[in-house]
Amino acid sequence: MLLLWIIIFIVSLFVLLKGADWFLSGSEKIGYALGLSPFIVGVVIVGLGTSLPEIASSLAAVIKGVTEIVPANAIGSNIANILLVVGISAVWGGRLAVTKNLIDLDLPLLAISTALFLGIAWDKQITFGESVLLLVLFVIYLAYTIFYKDDKEREGDKNIRQLSKISPRDIFFLLIGGFALIAGAKYLVDSVVKLSEILAIGTGAISLAAVALGTSLPELFVSVKAARQNKPEIALGNIFGSNVFNMLVAVGLPGLFGVLKLDGPTFKIGLPMMLIATVLFIISGISRRIHVYEGAMYLVIYAFFIGKLFNLI
């Protein structure tokens, strides 16, 4: 029985990630066909697309009634994005430079979003009103990003709009991707619940580690590839955007449909570790460089986090 549910977990996670990829591909091409600029497509569609697995699995968790999975998934994903994804990107791709745009815009927004999220989650629950507040901050973040980004960058985007027709293939990928997202999210949550019962481990702990790690794979692939191609703004900007999405949307949206609970491991281990990881990331950002040794340190801290989560150390 244990092996069966492990297989279901792996297969459903793969379907969830593949569905997000198909849905993103279809959405991106339809966005271009509708005349949206590459900048808008990148900020809204691609930014949201890399967080679709977290959003889909969180909504499925609320429907299933295991709301503790939602904050655990978002918190665990943010920890994995910083300590694991940035760590591997820095070690694999060499020193990462932090551009002025990221420091001026993304760094303060990440700090504000994290501070608000920590304040909201400090009573071990996230209510409807608090979820609305998270979504309002996201709308402000989105508007600020779109309307106050560097004028030259936006002007450049206007000159390279890609107008084309919406093809049946694009619609097919959008629909099949959406179906795969729903199915993958449902069975992923089911497998987490069953595994927690069989292993006598809280669903929060499994979500903090396994689910969060799995749903962070899109960010890992994007950031490592960008780091290898010497595109640090993409490698790091992907993490900034994804972490803000996770806290504000992947928690705020499911929170509209029920009160979200933080279980013991999420509150005692996950929340403090997310704060530590974010502070380290911000410090690295202010210093304008993330060196190989810093990336290695991130990976060691992530290993410590997993060990602490499962009482291995």
Image (cartoon, grey):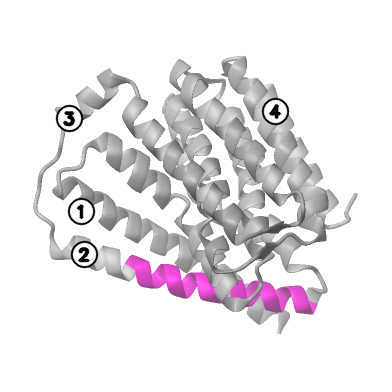
- Residue 306 visible? The answer is no
Q: Earlier in the sequence, mark 3 or mark 4?
A: 3
Q: Badges 4 and 2: C-beta atoms under 8 Å apart?
A: no
Q: Badges 3 and 2: C-beta atoms under 8 Å apart?
A: no
Q: From the viewer's side, name the closer residue of 92 and 266.
A: 266
Q: Earlier in the sequence, mark 3 or mark 2?
A: 3
Please state if 126 lies on the left or on the right of 199 as rendered: left
**Which region of the structure is painted magenta?**
177-198
Q: Which of marks 4 and 2 is nearer the N terminus?
A: 2
Residue 11: percent from left, percent from top: 53, 71
Residue type, label 3: Lys
Please state if 212 lies on the left or on the right of 14 as rendered: right
- In this figure, which residue is indicated by the disc labeled 4? 280
Q: Is mark 3 on a helix, strand or loop?
A: helix
Residue 153 magenta-highlighted: no
On the image, which quarter does residue 39 sit in? top left
Q: Residue at x 82, y 59 (%)?
A: 264
Residue at mark 4 to residue at mark 1: CA–CA distance:
38 Å
Q: Which of marks 2 and 1 is nearer the N terminus?
A: 1
The N terminus lies in quadrant? bottom right
